[in-house]
């Protein structure tokens, strides 16, 4: 399952693969926390939910930025990732709880949040409108959300260059447009319209563009090893013969060598930070 990554993949193999590379993945994505948390507008104590929280790095950053008296709940469909999040160190004064939960389904314990956030955890629902209608009900009427989703592949060469380079050596399936996967909401206007139909209002989107350090800060060879093991598309190379695998890996190292800053691979990224409120229905 490389062309489209679904929630059920995350609850099993994909979640375990993310956990196995969690430290460099979280270090690489950390720069997205600041604009996301700023967009959440944590101006007093709130009950906050982090959707598709993975190993909990954003939940912890949110808790550190939240007013005393707040509480943070992280929800993820992957038991392996929730275990990894729970295993992390204590977080400060704001309590955090992590739960195994499909965010496309109602909460077992009725709860309503003042704030919903997600760093790249909401692009994998099989029925997107139903899932966002469900999430709207997790929020109090008027409660605010801030979601980070990737812009287009062309503006995210940190990820798309891997596909391009591998395609020169092996067959790489093409994702269906709009199907579950990292670039599902690359068109911010279409995403806003989906959210509007799902019970949210006052939707707006800001672009965040910067360079990401691959793996959090790696030289070209380590960065190539990292992406080939951490991302499903990279794992496709496991199925090819040694000569093909070596040739693809050499091309990747050479490409990364053109993107070094102080010896570490940095590549452009574009994230939509999408905000809005639950409609007063
Ligand atoms: C790209 S990872 C991001 C993880 C984390 N937010 C981060 O930025 O480090 C996507 C996450 O969404 C979770 N996920 C996917 N579908 C989900 C669903 N239906 N309900 C809850 N979590 C889901 C995955 O298990 C995974 O942890």
Image (cartoon, helix red, strand yellow):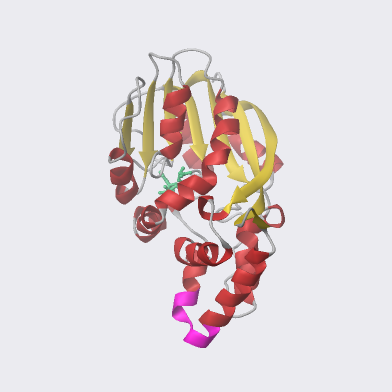
Q: On the picture, is 73 further left or further right than 224?
A: left
Residue 184 lies, with reference to residue 228, above or below; the image says: above
Q: Position of residue 220 (x, y in %)?
A: 58, 64
Residue at 71% in and 57% down = 154
**Looking at the magenta stretch, what is its main secondary structure?**
helix
The image quadrant of residue 12 is bottom left
Which residue lies most toward the front here? 262
Q: Nearer the viewer, residue 226 or 239?
A: 226
Q: On the picture, is 224 further left or further right than 98?
A: right
Residue at 56% in and 20% down = 41
The image quadrant of residue 72 is top left
Q: Position of residue 31 (x, y in %)?
A: 57, 39
Q: On the picture, is 205 further left or further right than 104?
A: right
Q: Nearer the viewer, residue 133 or 188?
A: 188
Q: Position of residue 59 (x, y in %)?
A: 42, 33
- Please say whether residue 177 is visible from this viewpoint: no
Q: Magenta segment: does it hold 31?
A: no
Residue at 43% in and 39% down = 57
- Please say whether residue 244 is visible from this viewpoint: yes
Q: On the picture, is 271 further left or further right than 221?
A: right
Q: Position of residue 96 (x, y in %)?
A: 34, 28
Q: Quadrant of the C terminus?
A: top right
Residue at 53% in and 57% down = 218
Residue 168 lies, with reference to residue 206, above or below; the image says: below
Magenta extent: 237-244
Callout count: 0
Q: Magenta segment: does it hold 241?
A: yes
């Amino acid at each position: 399952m490389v062309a489209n990554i679904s929630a059920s993949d995350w609850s099993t193999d994909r979640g375990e693969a993310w956990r196995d590379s969690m430290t460099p993945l979280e270090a690489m994505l950390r720069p997205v926390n600041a604009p996301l948390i700023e967009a959440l507008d944590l101006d007093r104590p709130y009950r906050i939910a982090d959707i598709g929280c993975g190993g909990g790095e954003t939940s912890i950053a949110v808790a550190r930025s939240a007013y005393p008296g707040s509480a943070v709940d992280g929800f993820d469909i992957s038991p392996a990732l929730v275990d990894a999040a729970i295993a992390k160190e204590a977080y400060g004064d704001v309590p955090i709880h992590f739960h195994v939960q499909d965010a496309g389904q109602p909460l077992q314990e009725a709860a309503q949040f003042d704030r919903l956030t997600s760093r790249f955890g909401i692009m994998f629902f099989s029925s997107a409108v139903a899932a966002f209608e469900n999430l709207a009900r997790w929020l109090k009427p008027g409660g605010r959300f801030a979601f980070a989703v990737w812009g287009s592949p062309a503006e995210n060469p940190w990820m798309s260059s891997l596909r391009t380079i591998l395609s020169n050596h092996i067959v790489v399936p093409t994702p269906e447009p709009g199907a579950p996967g990292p670039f599902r909401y690359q068109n911010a206007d279409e995403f806003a319209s989906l959210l509007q139909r799902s019970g949210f209002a006052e939707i707006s989107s800001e672009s965040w563009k910067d360079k990401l350090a691959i793996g959090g800060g790696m030289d070209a060879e380590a960065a190539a090893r990292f992406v080939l093991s951490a991302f499903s598309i990279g794992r496709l190379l496991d199925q090819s013969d040694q000569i093909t695998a070596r040739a693809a890996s050499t091309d990747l190292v050479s490409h990364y060598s053109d993107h070094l800053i102080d010896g570490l691979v940095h590549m452009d990224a574009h994230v939509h930070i999408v905000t809005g409120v639950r409609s007063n229905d």
